[in-house]
Every structure is written in C-alpha cells, then in structure tokens.
Image (tube, coloured by chain):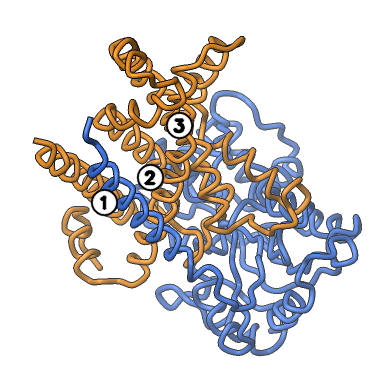
Amino acid sequence: MSVATPQCLFLAKSAVLSALVLTAAGPLAAGTPFIILASTTSTEQSGLFQHIVPQFTARTGIEVRVVAVGTGQAFAIGRRGDADALLVHHRAGEEQFVAEGYGSERRDVMYNDFVLIGPRADPAGVTQADSIQDALVRIAESSSAFASRGDDSGTHRKERELWSTARIEPSGRWYRQLGSGMGPTLNTAAAMDAYVLADRGTWLSFRNRQELVIVFEGDEALLNAYGSIPVNPERFDWVKADLARKWHDWLVAPEGQTAIAEYRINGEPLFFPFRD
Amino acid sequence: MNSHDPFTLALSLILSGDPGLFGIIHLSLQVSLSAVFVASLIGLPLGAAIALFRFPGRGLVITLLNALMGLPPVVAGLLVYLSLSRAGPLGQFGLLFTPTAMVIAQTLLVLPIIAALTRQAIEDLWEEYREQLQSMGSGRVRAIPTLLWDARITLTTAVLAGFGRASAEVGAVLIVGGNIEGVTRVMTTAIALETSKGDLALALALGLVLLTLVAAVNATAYLLGQMSRSRMQ
C-alpha cells in the first residue's frame, strides 16, 4: 500500500482546517470589558436593547451581552451567579431575589403595560368588558380558547395573578399552557384564534398577527414594570460588580431614561421611564 | 426590506453584504466545524479501537454509543450548562455564554455519531482484511491508521453526518451560548429568534441561507473526495 503521499495530503488538509478553526477563535479573546445581562424576551424582541445598549457602550466602553430568557429563568441564571445584572419584570420575584441576597438592590427602570390580545371576531365579547377581571370572566364563561405562556415568565406570573384576582382557576380544554416565549405564544394564538395576554412591546413589534387585535387594554392592573438588579458580589465574588453598577446607574440616570423614552416603533413609545 | 417572498429575501440578504449576517454565518461555521474537528479527532480513533479490540462490556459500550446518537440537543446543552455554570465544576473558567461553550456542547452531540459510524465501518473492513493485515505482521494498534485511511470515503460521510447534526441543532447552543447578539448568535438561534418575532419570511430566508451553507460544505467535501480518488488512479 503506497499511501504515504495521500496520507500526508490528508494531514496537511487537517492542519489547514485546524489553523482555520483556531484563528477564527481569535476575536473572542478581545479585551473589551463586558457584562452579562439576564433579561426578558419581551425587552430583547421589542428591539429596545439594540437602541439603548450602543449608547451605553459609547459612553462607558462597556459591552452589554444580553441573554434573553423568561423572567423565571433569568432569576435562575442569577441564582447561579451566571449573570452580572438582571433587567426583569416581576416585582414580587425581584424583591425576593434581593431579600435572599442574590441581588444587591432593585430599582424601577421603566414600565409599559400588558394588553389582552384576541381574535377580531371576539367570541367572548371581551371588548365590552369594563375591567380585566371582567374580561377574563367572559373568556372563562364562554370557554373561549386562551393561550397561556405557561413558562414562569414575568408575563405568565402576571397572568396567573390576574386569574386569581378574578377568582378563576383556569382549567379545561380552552385553557392551553404552551410553555413558550411571548413570540411563539402569539404565533400559536394567531393560528388557533385564541386570547392571549401579551406585553405591549412584543405586541407592537410582532409581525405575524393574522386575525389578532388588542381586545382589552388600559386597566391599571395591567401595569408592567421593569426593575434592574445588579447581582450581589458578596454572594458571588466573580461578578463584575463595578461594571454592572455603571449599567444599573446609567439606566436610571437622565441619559438612560431619555434613551429608553426615545425608543419608538411607528412613532409609538414602547417603554416609559420611571423618572417622568 | 418589504419583500415577503423568502427566496427574494434570502437573496437580497446575501447580496446586501450585511455585516451582521456575515458575522452570524462566520460564527455558525466556526462553531460547527470546530466541534466536528474535535469530535473527529477523538471519534475516529475511538470508533476504530472499539471495532478492533475485544474487552468486557464491549456490547454495552457499542449500544450506549449508538443510543447517544439520539442524545437530545437540549439535554446536551443542559449538561454543558450545569458544568460550565459559575456554580458548576468547571465554573472558574468563565466559559458559559461564549462560543467555546457552544463548541463543547456540539462536540458532545457529534462525537457519538462519528464514533458509532466509524466503529461500524472499521469493523466491516476488519472482517475483510483481517488475515491480510495479520499476515503482514500488523498488530491491531498498527492496523488502525491503515483501516481508517482505507475507509476514508465512508468516514467522510460519517463526519458529514456529524456536521449536519451540529449545524442543524438549536437547543444546545441556545442554552450554553445564550443567543447573545454579535457574540453567540448563530444561524439556528437567529432563525428561532425571528420566528419568535413573528417575522416568518425573514426566518425562512435565514433558513435558506443556512441550507445553502450546509450544501456548500457538503459539496466541498464531495469535490475533495473526487480529487483524492482521481489522484489515486
């Protein structure tokens, strides 16, 4: 078997490939300081970060790497010390996170509201409801399809609170727990003409609406507040506390608050700063 | 971009030379090719060794290897996440949410495929050439490189199957990479994100770009195979 030459060729090819692979890994080692921010799919998918993070980076030279997950999972990431800061939306959960010592402090950053989305035909007559509780009662009584996130996200936690204030334990074939993010849940709701609770930011930037429209909005109970929490360096000594603190402070400073207020889709603001 | 035809959209995406898209394509290839490279480095000799040597529990190892070809990417991702997490055993390296973590997770997915398919190919070949190789005085260890070289056409398919798995999976890289824009966002996680946003046309267009890429890698492998074959004659 005179295989020496082709074998050498094979080795040469492998060497070239490995060199290619290794050089490709180069840019990762770049020394830009960065923090990991665990945040929600609603903020990421609304496009907010693409608007405000470059302004923060230009100002401070700190890169913000956003890991967008549900609020429940963001807490879980924070509890393992895998993020430097959180920007999430479930007040009770946030306060608990700080009280348990995982976060140093919590500050209000911005808010918008939740909206009840449903099919244009509105089989449950939700558009005539005078409160969100009334709207949910109408959906439950008519057994109209309702798509629930079912993923322990901030929106899902809010939805469960609203059902409980309406004194309804949703169950039955009409109540569908999807276990998905906001976008996939809206996609599914659009496909099965279901009602669904959504944050306004994701709804405004959502493209595949089909027959879905806003059927109920404006109740005070639908307020959706976002809080910032730096992860506690006393608990996890590796977190980048100084960098995370700069981000946390910038968000509530006039500059960050203005950046948030300026973000619009089709002229419509998505988030309102708390410092108004 | 107002076009809602995914084909037109895919084409205009590529032609627009959008640096964001090229960054994502580059990272996808970098992560998946690295994973396939590392998995081949381990999987080819490992598969050959299992084919040639007899040891207690060999049947179990082969069954396990074959079963791991079906390892769900989400599970692989979760295992790597728990290992690389700051609170995990390898936490001090700070690898979570980096491309390196994605390479590790995909290596875990690709390795069983390459090792299992190599084991089968080499075992068949060994049955065929056993007497010949043994009469030449080759021991089993010395036979490994020869057999691997002889089975290279079949093994290329095994490696490409591994590459297919790596480039197609989304569950593992999403968990260990975090889909961070410009850092760990690859084609599959970008497609999942656009689907979440309800921008189905853009998602499908990105899917077409990914398919084209995978086809290009496979075509390159095929051409290299043809070249080395013609050189042999």
Residue A249 vertical position relative to residue A152 in the rendered view, above or below: below
Asked whether residue A127 is in view, the answer is: no
The x, y position of residue B129, in whole percent, is 29, 14
> Which chain does tag 2 point to?
B
- Is there a contact, CB below 8 Å, between mark 1 and mark 2? yes
The kind of secondary structure element at disc 3 is helix
Of the two numbered discs 1 and 2 on the same chain, state the one appearing first in sequence: 2
> Which chain does tag 3 point to?
B
The x, y position of residue B15, in whole percent, is 19, 68
Of the two numbered discs 3 and 1 on the same chain, state the one appearing first in sequence: 3
Q: Are marks 2 and 3 on the same chain?
A: yes
Q: Are marks 1 and 2 on the same chain?
A: yes
Q: Are marks 3 and 1 on the same chain?
A: yes
Q: Which residue is mark 1?
A: B213
The kind of secondary structure element at disc 2 is helix
* Residue B45 disc label: 3
